Image: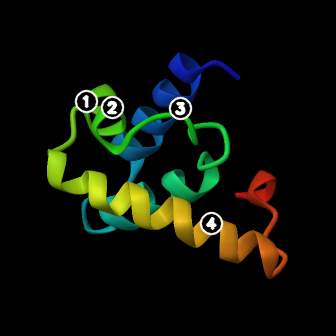
Amino acid sequence: MSNKAIFEQIKLALSNAPRNQYTVELHLQMIKFADELKHITAKEFCEELGLKQSLGTEFSKMRNLTTRLKAAGLNTDLI
């Protein structure tokens, strides 16, 4: 899947998330696409989605967390 398609899918998921679940959905999408976006910087991630730059830290955290979750058996294809 291309980066453009991934970002469009993330945007759609975020726009469909209930207001009180936006941050949860954002984290979930970060985990889901961590491997495909491993070459993207946190700054680029935020710019592509129109997010505050401060959320770049969350992107980095979720990428690191994904490695540990996958080692514990998480299949991100099921998210």
Report the amino acid beneath label 1.
Glu
Say which residue appears at 28% left-offset and 38% top-offset. 43
Judged by depth in the image, the label closer to the viewer, 3 or 1, is 1
Say which label, 4 or 1, has the lower sequence index.
Answer: 1
User: Alpha-carbon distance for marks 3 and 4?
Assistant: 19 Å
Looking at this view, name the residue that lies furthest to the bottom. 72
User: Alpha-carbon distance for marks 4 and 2?
Assistant: 19 Å
User: Alpha-carbon distance for marks 2 and 1?
Assistant: 5 Å
At label 1, counting other C-alpha atoms closer than 10 Å, the crowd grade (few under 14, some 14-19, many 20 or more) is: few
| Mark 2 lies on residue | 44
Judged by depth in the image, the label closer to the viewer, 3 or 4, is 4
Report the amino acid beneath label 3.
Gln
User: Alpha-carbon distance for marks 3 and 1?
Assistant: 15 Å
Q: Which mark identifies residue 9?
A: 3
Say which residue appears at 40% left-offset and 34% top-offset. 11
Report the amino acid beneath label 4.
Thr
User: Alpha-carbon distance for marks 2 and 3?
Assistant: 16 Å
Query: How many numbered circles does the render carry?
Result: 4
Say which residue appears at 79% left-offset and 57% top-offset. 78
Callout 1: SS: helix
From the viewer's perspective, tell me whether residue 71 is left or right of residue 20. right
Q: Looking at the picture, tell me which residue is in the foreground, 48 or 18.
A: 48
From the viewer's perspective, tell me whether residue 70 is left or right of residue 55. right
| Mark 1 lies on residue | 47
**Colouring scheme, one of rainbow, by chain, secondary structure, one colour:** rainbow
| Mark 4 lies on residue | 66
Quadrant where the image shows the N terminus: top right
Report the amino acid beneath label 2.
Glu
Callout 4–callout 1 Cβ contact below 8 Å = no
Callout 3–callout 4 Cβ contact below 8 Å = no
Callout 2–callout 1 Cβ contact below 8 Å = yes
Say which label, 3 or 4, has the lower sequence index.
Answer: 3
